[in-house]
Image: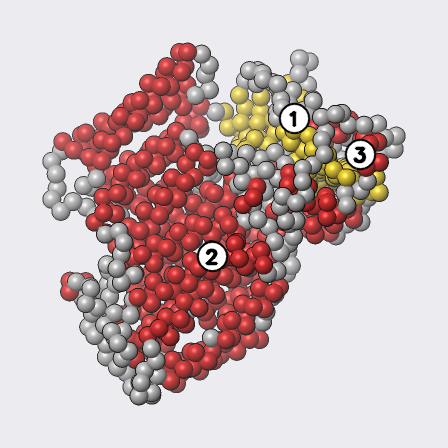
Amino acid sequence: MFRAAPPAGLYGVVVFAAAWLVFWVQPLSVRGVLPILGGSPAVWNTAMVFFQAAVLAGYGLAHLLATRVPRAGQLAVLGLLWAAAAAAAPIGGLRLLGDAPGDLPPVLWLLGTLAGALGPAVVAASCLTPLVQAWLARSGTGEAPVDPYFLYAASNAGSAGALLAYPFLLEPALGLEIQAWGWSAALLGLAPFLAFLWLALPAGRVAVSPRPASVPARQAAALPAWRILALSAVPSGLLLAVTRYLATDVASVPLLWVVPLAVYLGTFIHAFAPRTLIPHRVLVRLMAPGLIVLAIVYALAPTILAVGLLHLVVFALSGLYCHGALARLRPPASDLTRFYLLVSTGGLAGGLLVALAAPLLFVDVYEHPIALALVAALLPAAAIRPGRAPYVVGSVALALVLGGLALVHATASGFGEESSLLAGAGLCVTVLAAPALLAMRPRPVLLACALGAVFLVPSALNLGRDAHLARERTFFGVYRIMEKDGVRQFFHGTTLHGEQWLRADGSPESRTTYYGIGSPYYELMTSLARRPSPLVIGLAGLGTGSLACYARPGDRLRIYEIDPAVVRLARAHFAALSECAPKASFALGDARLSLEGEASELDVLALDTFSSDSIPVHLLTIEAFRVYLRVLAPDGVLAVHISNRYLDLEPVLASLAHELGLAARVKNHEAPEDASPRQPSLSSRVVVLARDEATLRALDLDAGWLALGSPDRVRVWTDDYTSILPLLRWW
């Protein structure tokens, strides 16, 4: 329509802005629903599936508009989408399925809530990446008709920019409501630019160049749909698996959501940039050794501090390889929107398999190693089939690696020089034999099977060695009930959440681990028991129910637990509830939301709601503490369990106590060294808070209870702001 087409840079600005909006709204919206679903890491992964589905819908719409709808119809459809977004401003407020899940499965409630609140707006923003590229290909601007794919790199740069800006700039500076209004205004502000680009479209259909100059002629004939889907699905599934791995053991916060996603998007930017920094052939060579190293290290030390960074490095290599291979399959511009439709379909398939199917199929987090092994299966096969010798070498190496790992795990819990020597021998055999697994590289499927076996060895060995009484996986995590040497233990993720063992007279001892004799909780509950009148006790987080055994006859006990599976497992396998609190009342759901609807006067509220070592940050904000203070009696006490392997939470409590004018003490309990499985207590750290110093003095706590540190070390947490960066233990 215009004699002079708009500059290619304007198309890039629109695509960049649209992608920024799509990936800004992801952490923004999930932060808004975290309090309802207890801060579970599964919230982010389930939300990711929704956004992948919305992006697929947007790409499908773009494909339809670019290939089937005339120029005027495209403007009409976009106008309807932007009108719907304007009517729903600010985004995020509509909850089609109510304000809480109720009897609905959390996954369905979350997907329905996000669809109602964000669906049209996210589809509108996401359709712009392929549609604007198709417009550029038809506009005749510079080299655009030949290869408009550079805009895909711009799109992913916008996505990564938004994700990195969120935890460091947007979240600290802006509240959720202001962000929601700002997001809606930015989306509506794109409308004039879209209208300008639309006016530049020629009235008729314009043929584009048959293929980009950088695409080999053999690729221009037909799209290899199955390979495009696989190369999209595997890194997408691996993204969610890595995110779950990080968030489960640290915290479900935007920082740990966006880092893997930013890495993922960075690999897209690299793959579709006009020039790549790392040649594809180099990535092909690095991929197999990187996966082998990760498999061995993961099997030996499957903890986040040991292999967290290595996971991110191998994840980055996997994304660089898969997306680089994907970029080499890109078709001519005439088939651009179909290519993006296949890419987004594969991404959604990977997300669905990891976020929704895996929890139903697996009782443990097996999807993570499986996704890593599948990366190896996507490596190019050797052009010439080698003889049998390499596969014999690879098979022997695999047997030696698995045998070495079995020896290490079998002697890991032993003591003495003999056990150390055997473990060392197993480690040496494993490390020396591992490089020979590369002999299977000419046949990627065989290498993938070998890696899968190595990755899954720890789980298989644990299953065979430990007596599992129960294993269950829910939206909120993986639970294991084990018994060894007469000690029954309850694990959530990688963290011990309680245990019981039998006394000399055969009766069960439930007051153990962090709640045992000599622990901070023991001292606090013993002090409260000196009060003459019956106590009203609130326990947020059940575990095995150990704290219930500090209740006296006549005390009233109220337990707040978000996952019904925890209540079921505690009742079936532990004696605390039946022996100590048979008449306890339960509130199923998030503790904060349950307390908001109550008018109790609790004498003590024990906050012990961590899942694995992940902290539900919404329970440690100033708004949450105001809820706790409202339900506490005038001389009531709040006890917060802050034991954590990775985060120092004391500064958060110090800033909250200072802001609210509370008296507070902390005790760091170091349990005595004891080789016996029946220890009186484990090391723990507990903070107690009260409205005034007189209440704390009346408890007559011992000298080990100290004042909290400086309240100025961290900014006070609110529902609009949380940051774990200052709290990380870097050693």
The percent coordinates of residue 672 (x first, y second) are: 62, 18
Residue identified by numbered label 1: 669
Q: Give yes or no for contact between labels 3 and 1 (Cβ–Cβ under 8 Å).
A: no
How many labels, in total? Answer: 3
Residue at (55, 15) in percent of width and height: 675
- Per the model, the C-alpha gap separating discs 2 and 1 is 39 Å
Q: Position of residue 630 (x, y in %)?
A: 78, 48
Asked which colour scheme the image uses, the reply is: secondary structure
Q: Is residue 507 above or below residue 89?
A: above
Residue at mark 2: 163
**Which residue sits furthest top?**
417
- The residue at the point 69 percent across, 22 percent down is 517
Residue 307 seen anywhere in this rendered image of the structure: yes
Point out residue 221 in the picture as x, y percentages from the top left corner. Answer: 18, 66
Which class describes the residues within 10 Å of circle 1: few (<14), some (14-19), or many (20+)? many
Whether residue 665 sits left or right of residue 433 in the image: it is right
Quarter of the image holding residue 685? top right
- Mark 2–mark 1 contact, CB under 8 Å? no
Q: Work out whether 118 lies above or below 557.
A: below
Secondary structure beneath disc 2? helix
In the rendered image, which residue does mark 3 sit on? Answer: 696
Left or right of 415? Residue 321 is: left
Position of 662 compared to 438: left or right?
right
What kind of element bears circle 1? strand
Residue 385 at what x, y percent from top left?
12, 42
The three-letter amino acid code for the residue at tag 1 is: His
**Number of residues whose C-alpha sits closer than 10 Å to that of mark 2, classed few (under 14), some (14–19) or many (20 or more):** many
Give the mark nearer the N terminus: 3 vs 2.
Answer: 2
Q: Which three-letter amino acid code belongs to the residue tagged 2?
A: Leu
